[in-house]
Amino acid sequence: MHLYSGNSNSRLSARMAVFFAFCVLLGGGIVHSATGSFAPAETHQTIEGFGGSAYYYDNWLTAHPYKEDIYYYMFEDLGTDILRFGNQYGHSAGAFNPHSPEIAAAAEDYLGHPVKILFSSWSPPAYLKSNNSTKNGGTLVKKDGHFDYAGYGQYWAESLDAYEELGIVPEYVSIQNEPGYVDTWETCELLETEKNGKAGYDSALNAVYDALQARGNPPKLLASEVLGIGYNLFQNYARYFNHDQVFGYAHHLYHGGDPKHPDAFLPAMKAMASGFGDKPRFQTEYSNGDADWLNTAWIMHNSLVYEEVSAYLHWGLMWPGDNELVKIDNPWNSSGWETSDGFSLTGRYYAFRQFSKFIDPGWKRITADVDSKNIRLSAYISADGDSLTAVILNVSQTDESLSLDLGGYQMAYGSVIRTSETEFGEDLGAFDPSSPLDVPARSITTICMTGQTGSAVGSGGSSRLPGTPVIQSIFPNPFNPSTVVCFYIPASAQTRLVLSDLRGREIRTFLPGALHAGQHSVQLDGSGLASGVYVLQLRTNTGLTAGRKVCVVR
C-alpha cells in the first residue's frame, strides 16, 4: 500500500499515517469504542455447572503436603460445580478409587455443599473385556455366543452400590468415555451399534438403563461422550441409542474445530445445537496445548453461546502439565518441585475461573449483543433475577472501550474481575454502568452484578440488596502481606472481621468499629501469618455473620 501518490489529499493521508505510526511507537495506540446490550427477559439454556476431572494423579493430590491449599483452589476459589471421576470398580482385588472419597469430601468442605459428581467409565473390569484387560482397547466379552450386555448393566448397578457405601453418589453417569476410541490406556471399543465384531453402544446403554432403573433412584444418564463433534460422530451414535433413556447429550472437543482458531468450532457447535436442542448438552472434557489461556476462554464462550451447552468441563482440575488448571508437582520428590509449594495455578485456571466462579447452576444464559468484532460477550442471570454476570473477551490486539446497556436490569452493586497478560483474576473494584468500561487487548473481564429486573432500585421497589452481611470481594487473594476486603451490612452495627484457622481457632481480629448500613472496605494486614488457608468472618453485634476463605502466601 502506498501512502503517497502525488496529490494533496494523499499527502495529508500520508502525514496522518506517519503521525499515527509515531503515536503507536510512543505507546499511545488506538482505543476502539464499542456498545453492548443485554436482554434479561430473553433466556436460553439452564446452566448445570462448570468443573473438571480428578481421575489420574489423584494419588498425587491426596499425598501432597499442600493438598489443603490445592483443594481450596480446585473447589472454593474456582467455584467448581461438577467433579468428574472414573469408575474403577472391579479393576483390582483391593480398594478401588481409594482417593475419590477424600477428594469428594474436600470438595464439600470447601464449597459448603456436596459437589455434583459425574461418573465416566474408561473401561469396565477385565472380566467383561474381550481382551481380558482394561487397557489396549478390546470390546465387551461374549457369553454364550453373545455380547454380555446384561453383565455390563449389572456391573454398573453393583459399582454404584459400592461407591454409595463410600459416600459417593453420582448425579450423572456416562457409561463409556470416548466409546469409539482405542489406545494403550484404559479404553473399550463400543461402536454405534453392534457390527464388525464389536459390541454396540446402544445395546450397552439399554442394559445399563434397565439395571439402574431396577436399582432405584437412578442417576442422570449422559450419552454418548464421544471424542469430538467433528465428522458427524455424535450424530452417528445418536441414530441408534434410545434418547428417552438419557437426561442429556455429552461429548468432548478433540475434533470438530481448531484450538488455535476457536471460531473454527462454530459449524459443528451450531449443528449440535440445532440437531439436539431437546436436552441439555454437556461438554465433559477438553484440554489442548494449542489453546492458550485466552483461546480456552474463547472456546468456552463459543460452547456456551453457539452450542448452548449447559455444562463445560476442563480435562484436569489438577495435573503435572501446563495444559490443565492446577499444575501439581510430584509429592514424593520435593527437590524437583518447580515452586516452593509444589503446585501452581496456570493461565488456563484464571481463564476458566472467569466463568466458573461467577456463574452458578440454575442460572440461565440471556441474550447479549455487541457491535465489535473484537469482543465476545455473554451474560447469565440467576433464577430469581437477583444476580447477573457478564463475561467479556477481547480477542484482539487492540484495546476497547465498551458501553453497556443493561436492558432494564436495575443494578444495585457490581464488581469487575479481570484476567489478562498481566492480571490474574484481579478484582478491579466497583462497576459503573454509566461509564464505558476499559477492555484491554487480549483480556477476559467478568462483571458480577446484584440487583433486580423490572422497577428501578430506589424508586419504590426493593433494591434486592441482601438482608444479611456479605463479603463481596477480597483482593488480592491469595495475599502477602495485606489485602482489601469489601463488604456490605444491611443495617448500622458494631462490626469486626475475625480471622480463624480451618479448625476454628481465632488467629486475629480486625475492628472497623461502628459502621452505617451499606458497602464498606477495609485493609487487612496479614504480617506474621504463616502460609495457608484461613477463614475470614464478618461479624456484627446484631448476631449476623458472613464468611469467606482467604489464602496467605509467603
Image: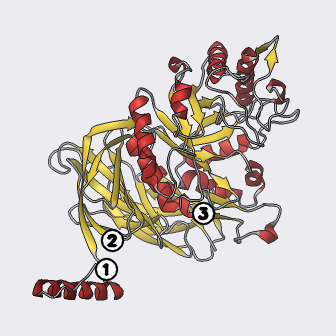
SS of the residue under disc 1? loop
Q: Position of residue 467 (x, y in %)?
A: 34, 47
Q: Amino acid at mark 1?
A: Gly
Q: Position of residue 374 (x, y in %)?
A: 33, 62
Classed neighbour count for the residue bearing mark 2: other residues with Cα under 10 Å, few (<14), some (14–19), many (≥20): many
Classed neighbour count for the residue bearing mark 3: other residues with Cα under 10 Å, few (<14), some (14–19), many (≥20): some
Residue 333 drawn above or below residue 270: below
Q: Position of residue 6 (x, y in %)?
A: 16, 88
Classed neighbour count for the residue bearing mark 1: other residues with Cα under 10 Å, few (<14), some (14–19), many (≥20): some
Q: Residue at x 56, y 27 (%)?
A: 237
Q: Amino acid at mark 3?
A: Leu
State the residue position of label 1.
29
Q: Position of residue 104 (x, y in %)?
A: 66, 42
SS of the residue under disc 3? strand
Q: Which mark is residue 399?
A: 2
Residue 184 drawn above or below residue 10: above
Lower sequence index among marks 3 and 1: 1
The quadrant of the rendering that contains the C terminus is: bottom right
Q: Residue at x 46, y 53 (%)?
A: 262
Q: Please say whether residue 64 is visible from this viewpoint.
A: yes
Q: Is residue 36 left or right of residue 480?
A: left
Lower sequence index among marks 2 and 3: 3
Q: In this view of the protein, which residue sits in the foreground, 131 or 429?
A: 131
SS of the residue under disc 2? strand
Q: Which mark is residue 386?
A: none
State the residue position of label 3.
345
Q: Residue furthest left?
A: 8
Q: Residue furthest right?
A: 93
